[in-house]
Amino acid sequence: MKLTSEDALKLLSETEETIIDQTWIKHSKSVGKAVGIIAEKLNLDIDKAIALGYIHDIGKKFNYKHDGVFPHIMHGYKYLKSLGYDEEYAGICLKHSFLNNDIDCLSNNRDKTDESNPDYDFVKNYISSDYTIYDKIINLCDLMCSDKIMTVEKRLIDLLVRHGVYKNTRYHIKETLKLKKYFDELLGFNLYDLFPEIKENL
Ligand SMILES: [Fe+2]
């Protein structure tokens, strides 16, 4: 079943009423907005892009603890599958955390993404297949949005300040900058030109 942006927003709104910390909901809405703007410029399916942006962190609704089982990504994946949504919608819950089809390319190790994790092989194999352009846009916008849209440079510093440095931080930063450049080249101009509000969020 396809997930429309309207239905994705409903899933977020239902959750909004039941949780206290709504930071990630605001972030998800911000990601949806940003991906929609980029998708429009690239003549992609705008509604699909927005739906994926809204839904990528839905696993956080389960208020996970850091129990070493890929908490929010697996929870989100299984949740969307259980609701009957197509693989590409459930899949974004897994793919958004890892750049470059690489299980080691992520911004921190809070989800304990190592071999001791029972879902390690499944996730590693899942994300190893090529990412669609939609997956790549979500990857990028996840790293451009808190509850506001900002540059990846600003967002990466925010993440560093909040979560510190771990062994793959440098690799992740380099791949993030490469991803930004990839979209600059695809668009033929600096992607930040699409977001004039970025200047206010520096
Ligand atoms: Fe996110």
Image (cartoon, rainbow, N blue to C red):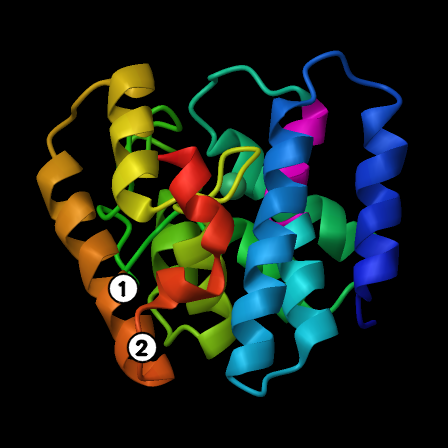
- The residue to which callout 2 is attached is 189
Q: Earlier in the sequence, mark 1 or mark 2?
A: 1
Residue at horizontal 56%, vertical 75%? 39
Relative to 159, does residue 169 appear above or below in the rendering? below
What is the secondary structure assignment of the residue under circle 2?
loop
- Asked which quadrant contains residue 30, the reply is top right
- The residue to which callout 1 is attached is 179
What is the secondary structure assignment of the residue under circle 1?
helix
Relative to 136, does residue 102 appear above or below in the rendering? above
Residue at horizontal 60%, vertical 78%? 40
Residue at horizontal 23%, vertical 68%? 181
Identify the amino acid type marked 1: Leu
Disc 2 crowd rating (10 Å Cα; few below 14, some 14-19, many 20+) is: few
Identify the amino acid type marked 2: Phe
Q: Is residue 96 visible?
A: yes
Query: Considering depth in this image, is 23 or 74 the residue closer to the camera?
Result: 23
- Asked which quadrant contains residue 182, the reply is bottom left
In the figure, is residue 12 to the left or right of 151?
Answer: right
Disc 1 crowd rating (10 Å Cα; few below 14, some 14-19, many 20+) is: some
Q: Position of residue 47 (x, y in %)?
A: 74, 71
Residue stretch in magenta? 55-62
**Residue 136 — which label?**
none
Image quarter in which the C terminus is found: top left
Query: Considering depth in this image, is 127 or 189 the residue closer to the camera?
Result: 189
Relative to 110, does residue 133 appear above or below in the rendering? below
Q: Position of residue 170 (x, y in %)?
A: 10, 40
Q: Are marks 1 and 2 in contact (CB under 8 Å)?
A: no
